[in-house]
Each structure stands twice: as structure tokens, then as C-alpha cells.
Amino acid sequence: MKLAIVIPTFNERENIAELCENILTLPLRPDMEVKLIIVDDNSPDGTGAIADALAARYPSRVDAFHRLQERGRASAGIAGFRRALADPDVTHVIEMDADFSHHPSDIPKLVEAEPTADVIIGSRYVKGGIAINCAAVNRALSITINLVNFLFLGVHVLDSSGGFQVVSSKSH
């Protein structure tokens, strides 16, 4: 099993090295290979240079991908998924934020749940779930998005606006 973890970044110099080290040292199944794909949107704070240093230190495990023109969390996630799925050996893709709002220690929980569905979403709105570093306005927007998705689109997911999920490559 090859797991690609897509991490969109913009101005995450304070977090990206620690996050990557935490992920690369996770106790995962022995048959699981992990590849980090850092998608940096030309961060002025030097995040891209740190990502390059991580890629040089872990050449087979970290890929630093720089977007110089485009900006945006959603399009960075899409670009990361495309890059991950271009590797025919990738069986699963996780997307997560770089600011520790999604904790690396939760990755094994997502991976363990994977055989039950093609998509597993890490939710802030289930028992035991929390929203870390989330401003009140962002939380209100998230709740509104989830309500609209439920009422108008019939999406029965508690956290459809979150950015922490594992997707089986067979579902693309």
C-alpha cells in the first residue's frame, strides 16, 4: 500500500518541518509506504525553501511542488491529488492542513477505517472531534456549508467542509 499525503501550504514555515517529521515517524502498518506531497503557493515566508530542504533530506518520501502563479487552498489540494494519482503505485491519498488543525497522530485512524469505504473524512463535528485554531467566523461558515450541503444537495456528511480525508485511488 502506498499512501500519498497532500499538504497544501502558504506561509507555514513555523509548522511544515515539524509536521513532516511527525508524519514520517508515525507507527503505520509495515506494508505501508508514505510519500508527502507539499504543494506550496509561493509562500513569501520561506515555506517553499523548507519544503525543498525536506525533499532533499528525504528524496523518496517528500516531494516539494511549487505553484508560482495560482493561489488557493482548494486548487492546491486538487493539484496535489493530481500529482499523487499520477503515480500508479499510489493506492490512497490523504489531504491535510499544515497548521496542525489536523493532527498527524490521527492519520493511522483514517487509514484503519479505509477498508470500510472509498472515502473517509476526519470530522471536527463527531464525538471526540475538535476544531483547533479555528476562528468563530470560520466555524460559522463551516457549519453553514455543511447545512447547505445537507439540505440542498442531500450530502449526509457531518464535516463536508473539512480538509482531512483519505481517498482510495480506485475511487477516482
Image (cartoon, helix red, strand yellow):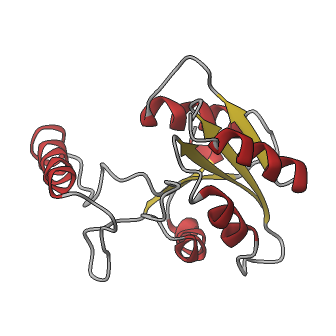
Q: Residue at x 68, y 68 (%)?
A: 23
Q: Is residue 136 above or below residue 83?
A: below
From the viewer's perspective, is 42 left or right of 138?
right
Q: Relative to the observer, which residue lies in front, 36 or 84? A: 36
Residue 39 position within the rendered picture, expressed as x and y whole percent measured from the top left? 62, 38
Q: Residue at x 60, y 69 (%)?
A: 111
Quadrant of residue 107 in the image? Answer: bottom right
From the viewer's perspective, is 57 left or right of 157?
right
Seen as rendered, the residue at the extreme front is 45
Q: Residue at x 71, y 34 (%)?
A: 65
Image label count? 0
Residue 127 position within the rendered picture, expressed as x and y whole percent measured from the top left? 27, 81
Q: Is residue 38 above or below residue 1?
A: above
Q: Quadrant of the C terminus?
A: top right
Residue 38 position within the rendered picture, expressed as x and y whole percent measured from the top left? 66, 44
Q: Quadrant of the N terminus?
A: bottom right
Seen as rendered, the residue at the extreme top is 69
From the viewer's perspective, is 59 left or right of 133?
right
